[in-house]
Amino acid sequence: MTDLIRLTDKRPDAEIKTLLDAVIADAASVWKETYDGEYPKVGFGLGRLRQVDCTGGGTPGTTTGVSYVTSKYFWALSVQTAGAWQDWFDITTSETAYLVITGVFCLDATPNVTEIRPYVDGDDFPVINVEELYTWDIARAFFSKPFAIKPQKKFRMRIVGKTAGQANFGLMGYVIAKRSYLITE
């Protein structure tokens, strides 16, 4: 990765649209299927990123020692050691889905997560200081450069927390996937 991913309090709509268009074009080429929008009846479509998508398309549970709640949209993680890097998740994405990561959110009154660092299929991203979003007094922040993960690729996210304990923190984005993936509960 050569571009620095920064947080912004403004949704970077042009960058998100450009990335979504590129991912949809790649999926159409790879899967040889038709893109069918938000509620696909055939082919593939677009859905909201869910916590289950970052457990490798499997059931919410424990991934690399990090516990999750079972809600699809509410994320909770356990900070094991204060001030130390640790895995949030380390997955291989589903063979029927692309993940498009547009930003992060925090639902804690007293935010705990201070930094994150994504690794996508061998590419190390720079450390992202998420404390910026707390100074804006908002619960979410967007990446100025959203990114995508192709099917069957490694996706790892590491975090640092101020204190040990639970953090209600998550990723925002989209899933571009085959209909069978999107309609699975």
Image (cartoon, rainbow, N blue to C red):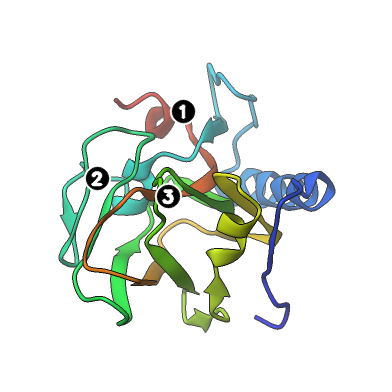
Q: Secondary structure at mark 1?
A: helix
Amino acid on which the number 3 mark rests in the picture: Gly
Q: Quadrant of residue 78?
A: bottom left
Specify few, some or many for label 2: CA neighbours under 10 Å numbering under 14, 14-19, or 20 or more: few
Which residue corresponds to the image point at 46% horizontal and 70% vertical from the top-left? 116
Specify few, some or many for label 3: CA neighbours under 10 Å numbering under 14, 14-19, or 20 or more: some
Residue 168 screen position, x and y as percent: 34, 48
104 or 114, which is in the foreground?
Answer: 114
Marks 2 and 3: which is nearer the front? 3
185 or 44, which is in the foreground?
Answer: 185
State the CA–CA distance, disc 1 to disc 3.
24 Å
Residue 62 screen position, x and y as percent: 15, 55
* Rendered view: 65 above or below 140: below
- Is any atom of residue 136 visible in this view? yes
Query: In the rendering, which numbered label is found on residue 149?
Result: none
Q: Which residue is mark 1?
A: 179
Which quadrant is the C terminus positioned in? top left
Q: Which residue is mark 3?
A: 170
**Left or right: 31, with 83 as reference point:** right
Query: In the rendering, which numbered label is found on residue 58?
Result: 2
Q: Secondary structure at mark 3?
A: strand
